[in-house]
Amino acid sequence: METAAPVRRLVKEVTGVVRDGLSQLPVENDVLYEEVEKMSSVLPTIWLGSQNGNIYVHSGLSQWRRCLHSVRLKDSVLSIVHVGGRVLAALADGSVAVFCRGPDGQWDLGSYHLVDLGRPHHSIRCMVTVHGRVWCGYRNKIHVLHPRSLQVEKSLDAHPRRESQVRQMAWLGDGVWVSIRLDSTLRLYHAHTYQHLQDVDIEPYVSKMLGTGKLGFSFVRITALLISSSRLWIGTGNGVIISVPLSESAGARNVSNNPQGAHRSMPGGVVRVYTDSSGSKLTPGSFIPYCSMAQAQLSFHGHRDAVKFFVAVPGCGGLSAATSETPLIENMELEALETKKPAAMLVMSGGEGYIDFRIGDGEEDEVGGETEPMASSQQHEQQDGESRGERSHLIVWQVTMQD
């Protein structure tokens, strides 16, 4: 049995992947794995940003430990996004570094553009891609940046106080949800017209579900935000995790007409069409992701400190690279990954400590119940005496996808 055969088959399948959605990788069928490795950053990559301003680029396919490229920027890297063949990195000094590929198809980190969005002592805390544009959170404002012209197409105030800070953003359809640092209210903005559509305060809901005794003296603030499986996942500074279904029916009557958007009736409903600032591009509307706290679900499984992040990946419980006899990527047909929706999504939250809000601050290991998360960090005390509730934890939920 030849051990190299699966690797060579995988390389041939990857050659059909459209790079950055722009062009195909020109690799012949008889190319060897070693030859592809010479152009490894042409293939999918993983970008890591550090507090000291370094960016590291690793392969997303194999030999993950080996760094392919690196560059030192002038301040801490706070956010990284990819859109339209460009990688944008938000820095703590209020600038955005924009990277593109070189003539050989590899990422060129030695040559990049810098876009200044404001004074150096105010950072860009978050970015999100929205319909081919990049929304950048800078102080209390959101700047909409074109990734190719590097021009700011629109600036809007997300909060009336200048000292406030846009902290998280999440996009779906024709809406962008925005959170403000040290605030319990989420704000929904239209992705095309930039209208302020809805405010949702989560503090009354959290206090009602858990009671003020569970929260102590700390107030509710939003520290993590994610949209996955048509649900808005909200993490708070108290370690509470909330999931809210998104639906246009929750508040579609509140949307006013947009002078830049053309509305035309079609059999079966209304189709919204929007133009860009120049009027040269039309974008069909999809739906506005309103939410109602009346349909919210609060997880009794949370963290002892702030929820640091959310991540969503396709998968099912019990299936992992660690337990599989052969690497998962070798067992998956690339065509199936591109054309079929996953049967389920795994949504993970990360934070310090674990707590069952039904029990409180007890250190019980067994929580039971049907709402038990699929996985968390190890269930036993470490030898150094650190308690289970103090260690960093991942909590994982499996969300079945609707047909």
Image: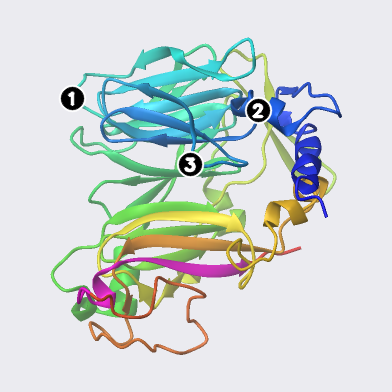
Mark 3 or mark 2: whose residue is earlier in sequence: 2
Mark 1 residue element? loop
- Quarter-wise, where is residue 230 in the image? bottom right
Question: How far, Cα to Cα, is label 3 from label 1?
Answer: 34 Å
Mark 2 residue element? loop
Please name the residue that numbered disc 1 is placed on: 121
Residue 389 colored magenta?
Answer: yes
Mark 3 residue element? loop
Quadrant location of the N terminus in the rendered image? bottom right
Residue 229 in view in this figure? no
Mark 3 or mark 1: whose residue is earlier in sequence: 3
Q: What residue type is labelled 3?
A: Arg
Q: How crowded is mark 1: few (under 14 residues within 10 Å), some or many (20 or more)?
A: few
Q: Residues within 10 Å of mark 2 (few under 14, many from 20)?
A: some
Q: Which amino acid does label 2 sit on?
A: Asp
Please name the residue that numbered disc 3 is placed on: 65
| Magenta stretch in the rendered image | 384-399
Q: What residue sits 78% from the left and 21% below the top?
A: 26
Q: On the rendered structure, is 292 left or right of 366?
A: right
Out of 10 and 109, give the one closest to the viewer: 10
Counting every numbered tag in the picture gives 3
Q: How crowded is mark 3: few (under 14 residues within 10 Å), some or many (20 or more)?
A: few
Residue 63 colored magenta?
Answer: no
Out of 73 and 82, give the one closest to the viewer: 73
